[in-house]
Each structure stands twice: as structure tokens, then as C-alpha cells.
Image (tube, rainbow, N blue to C red):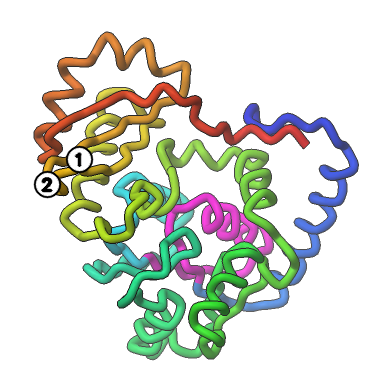
């Protein structure tokens, strides 16, 4: 069991293992699947169960502005290691996810992936596995009303929650394929009006630079001052990396100003941990 999972309720662990085995058996009923592989922990856990089931896998990744470079790199490493055919589609479209505010013009990610899949004759006949949690599917349906044709929402239909995905991700030690996966970059914006491609790139570049400096769990939150022009990077770090960050203040300031941030602050609020005390 992974070091990040603390089991205080053996009943939960046993029921989790039983449901995981059921999912593996359901996946094994397919000859071949396309997996939507974002690099988030949900898709990493899902594709790992697909491998365990023996189903033949093809992976598709929609590389849009809300995806971090660390997550895209994780998808490449995983697919290269296991010889999985991998199609990365680069797009400037900002797609919907359950954590995004309901702003106008969001792209339906499942339907967009389905459209791309239909462009390839050898892919078009295959089911597209959407590795969303039950609450993510609920948010998707609330926003878009229906599910695209030939998509498979196996995990959501079996009641798998975000909490379950985190548990499975850590239990299978999938963090070894790359740290710093902090979810959709839209989470770094408290004001939806600031969610622009340029600012998303600034956040992504800032987090990547901090990772290169050894601060691989850093999150950079985007703010502007009252003048709505001056940009501020609020850096949040886990407690065990803060002392190192204090020693590197000058380097961090220089690096993040290089990504066009005007001001940089260090957030002293404890970052939510991924360990599960169940």
C-alpha cells in the first residue's frame, strides 16, 4: 500500500478492493477501448485498471490551456513505458470541467474528443472511456444535458467518487509517473473573468519553473490588484517545502517575474493533503 494512504477503516478498504475488482472485470469484457487520458489522477487510475483487466488500450489526450505541462508529460511517460498508442491533440480551446465556473463559451470535452475519434477510421468504432467521478458526471449532465454517443462512463456509473479515485491513485503508487499534478489550472483563479489563455500560460509556466527548482508540489494562484492590471502570483507550498522556498526567495521572485507576474507572495495556509484517513 502506498505511503500516502492511511487506512483507519478496514471495512472501507475491503469494499474498495471488491469494487475495484468488479471494475476490472467489467473492463475485461471489452476487446479494446480508447481512454481519455488527461494525466489527472482520475485518468491515471482508470488507465491502470484498464491495463490490469487486459483490455487493449489506446489513449487520447486533449492538451488544452487548463492542462499543466506536468500532467501532459505524465501521460507521455506512462504510454511510452507500456507501449500504449497515444494521440495528443493540442488545442487553444478552454474546455469544461466540474471545477470551472459556469462561464460562457466552454467547450464540451467529451463531445470534442468524440469528434476527434470519428476522424480516424481505426478509432471510430471503439468505445471512448471517460474516467470521471460520479460528481463530475453529474456536473457534466447539469451543464450539457446528455452524454455523447459511444462514450463509456463506467467509473461514475459504479459510484466511484473523487475520494475513491485519490485512494486508488495513492494505493497503486501512480505518483511515481510524475509529481506536481494539481488538477485543472482553472482552480488557480478565484475570479472567472481572469480565466484567459495568457494568464493560464503564466500559471503553468510558473509552476513548471518552481518544479524545476525542486518545489514540485507548488501551486501558483493568479490574482490582480485593485487596478485590475498588476498581477500577483500567490505561491502555495506544503509545509515540508516552505523552508527551502524561504532560502530561495530571490530566485523564485526572479523566475516568476520572468513569466510576467508583477508581484509574488508565499501563502502560509497549510495545503490540503492527499493522505486519506478513512
- Answer above or below: position of 132 versus 10: below
SS for callout 2: loop
Return the mark for residue 117: none
Nearer-the-camera pick, 152 or 76: 152
Q: Which residue is disc 1 drawn over?
A: 225
Few, some or many C-alpha atoms within 10 Å of disc 2 (few <14, some 14-19, many ≥20)?
few
For the record, the magenta segment spans 35-61
Residue placed at 16% from the left, 19% from the top?
251
Q: Please identify the quarter of the rendering in which residue 8 is found.
A: top right
Query: In the image, residue 240 lies at what x, y percent?
Result: 46, 16
SS for callout 1: loop
Residue placed at 90% from the left, 42% from the top?
11
Query: In the image, residue 139 lies at what x, y percent?
Result: 56, 70
235 to the left or right of 130: left
Residue placed at 84% from the left, 44% from the top?
12
Residue placed at 22% from the left, 33% from the top?
209
Q: Which residue is disc 2 drawn over?
A: 229
Amino acid at each position: 500500500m502506498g505511503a500516502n494512504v492511511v487506512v483507519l477503516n478496514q471495512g472501507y478498504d475491503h469494499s474498495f478492493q471488491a469494487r475495484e475488482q468488479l471494475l476490472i472485470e467489467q473492463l475485461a469484457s471489452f476487446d479494446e477501448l480508447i481512454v481519455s487520458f488527461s494525466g489527472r489522477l482520475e485518468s491515471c487510475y482508470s488507465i491502470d485498471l484498464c491495463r490490469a483487466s487486459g483490455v487493449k488500450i489506446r489513449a487520447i489526450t486533449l492538451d488544452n490551456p487548463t492542462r499543466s505541462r506536468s500532467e501532459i508529460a505524465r501521460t507521455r511517460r506512462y504510454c511510452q513505458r507500456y507501449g500504449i498508442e497515444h494521440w495528443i491533440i493540442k488545442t487553444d480551446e478552454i474546455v469544461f470541467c466540474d471545477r470551472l465556473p459556469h462561464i460562457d463559451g466552454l467547450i464540451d470535452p467529451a463531445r470534442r474528443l468524440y469528434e476527434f475519434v470519428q476522424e480516424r477510421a481505426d478509432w471510430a468504432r471503439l468505445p471512448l472511456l471517460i474516467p470521471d467521478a460520479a460528481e463530475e458526471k453529474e456536473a457534466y449532465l447539469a451543464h450539457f444535458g446528455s452524454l455523447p454517443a459511444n462514450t463509456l462512463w463506467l467509473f461514475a456509473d459504479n459510484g466511484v467518487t473523487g475520494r475513491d479515485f485519490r485512494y486508488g491513485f495513492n494505493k497503486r503508487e501512480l505518483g511515481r509517473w510524475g509529481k506536481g499534478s494539481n488538477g485543472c489550472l482553472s482552480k488557480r483563479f478565484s475570479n472567472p473573468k481572469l480565466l484567459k489563455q495568457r494568464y493560464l500560460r503564466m500559471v503553468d509556466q510558473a509552476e513548471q519553473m518552481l518544479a524545476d527548482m525542486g518545489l514540485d508540489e507548488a501551486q501558483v494562484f493568479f490574482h490582480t490588484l485593485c487596478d485590475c492590471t498588476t498581477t500577483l502570483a500567490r505561491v502555495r507550498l506544503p509545509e515540508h517545502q516552505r523552508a527551502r522556498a524561504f532560502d530561495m526567495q530571490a530566485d523564485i521572485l526572479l523566475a516568476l517575474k520572468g513569466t510576467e507576474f508583477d508581484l509574488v507572495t508565499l501563502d502560509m495556509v497549510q495545503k490540503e493533503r492527499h493522505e486519506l484517513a478513512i
